[in-house]
Image: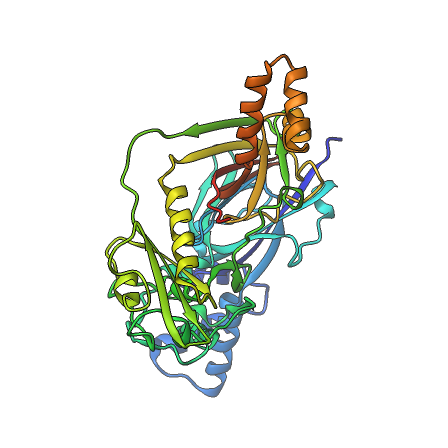
Amino acid sequence: MILHPRALARLEFLIDTKHRNRVAAALPPGLEEVFAGAVALASSGVLTDGGVVAATLLEKRIVEPQRVDVVPIQMEIKRTPYTEADAFSVEIDLNRFPLDPRIVREVRVEGHLDSAFGVNEGLQPDASTIMVSGYADRIAARPADGRLVLEGRDLTSLLIDRPHSGAALDLAMPAEELIRGILAAHPSTQGLRLEVRHEGATTLAPLRADANGQTLSSETRDTCWDVISRLAAEMGAVAWVEGDAVVIADRQRTTNIEALPSMVWGRNLTSLSIERGTAGRATPPVVVASWDPSTRRALSAMWPETEAAGESGAAAAVHTPNAMIFRLANVSDVEELRRTARAIWTRLAEADMTLTLETRDVTSVEGKSLLALKPGDSISVFMNESERASLYGLGMSARVRFLERQGYSPAVAQAIAAGYEELAPVYQVREMTFTWSASDGLSVRMECANLITVG
């Protein structure tokens, strides 16, 4: 028996009430007459007390969600940047689960994976194993190859597909109250919970470095998710959907190599490519703003510098067209903001670097689970084991000696060692795709970008 990381798809579906006659034909003996009587009374427009009861029973049998756990043939889960909804595709044996798309109105899908190796029937799905939860946008039955395919997006789509009311938000209220109000405004999102893992302030009016800091206005085309994401960004946090919860959390800023999951070519990577663009492109100005609590004034700085830098030009700097805006908390020195803006702009001006890597492992070299990674998290990537152990694991002088032992001249060894002193192998995950199949097990594909750090 071949053992793979385990997978399970939990489906919750509603029967399409337009096909009541088909459903009634499958009802157990004794309910056909109740069904027929309820339909006749409902169609005639006359409902006695008994008819109301019969119709209620009918609706309960047809409209009540049905739940089933299925071992898929194949399951793919794509984790995307925070501004987008995660996507999934699940393929199921049509002979084992003959769900006809013609009688199904709605299917909610939970995709589960765990890192234990064994038979799939041993997976006990719970909150810790959920990789994606959402609704199928497409259901297709393929009798030719015996497969039922469900494709869809996670619950972020409920907020992406819904336009915001356009009402200005009072930033004197805590942001979590504003977000709960957005979730409660429509039945489709009322079931979403809010989890705030942000440690900083959540009342935004005092933190905003502009003249209109008391309200947040939305554009006509803004969605509910646009507004929630903007509120999180104003807090110095990010928003994403995890299971049935909207999470507001601080950005991961760990650049300590020892604390990050490591991926090493020759150890746990089956594919690795590194691309760096060299074409010239315009880099937008960077504005870094902060609220100084000691003076209760808004400060900002821009790079490249303009006349709008400093306290008096805070509002102008923040509203510079095409500027990238970063907000820090409790910084009282404009020069510190200027240094930070320059460091960020310099990193942005460097050519983009993209790493694409694939692995069949569930964990990093250190044993950290890859199933918990999401876009925005940091990882370390090494070209080979000696690079990880020697070029980054040694001090400058020891690194030079190591390179000299590899045959480099002292001058070249010194230059390469100095280069590794500046080049930290830390990258930010941009997208992740988990592909599981009953025959081949799990493969993980990651697209990563160079990480902007300020030091």
Q: Nearer the viewer, residue 400 or 431?
A: 400
Query: Which quadrant of the figure contains the N terminus?
Result: top right
Q: Nearer the viewer, residue 5 or 429?
A: 429
| Residue drawn at x 39%, y 62% as measured from the top left | 334
Quadrant assignment, res 337: bottom left
| Residue drawn at x 32%, y 55% as measured from the top left | 302
| Residue drawn at x 69%, y 30% as measured from the top left | 389
Q: Position of residue 4 (x, y in %)?
A: 69, 36
Q: Is residue 387 left or right of residue 194?
A: right
Above or below, comparing residue 68 to residue 3 in the picture? below
Question: Is residue 31 something one can see in this rendering?
Answer: yes
Question: Is residue 109 something one can see in this rendering?
Answer: no
Q: Is residue 42 left or right of residue 271?
A: left
Q: Nearer the viewer, residue 361 or 334?
A: 334
Quadrant assignment, res 367: top right
Q: Is residue 215 left or right of residue 259?
A: left
Q: Position of residue 268 (x, y in %)?
A: 65, 30
| Residue drawn at x 67%, y 33% as measured from the top left | 395
Q: Position of residue 157 (x, y in %)?
A: 41, 57
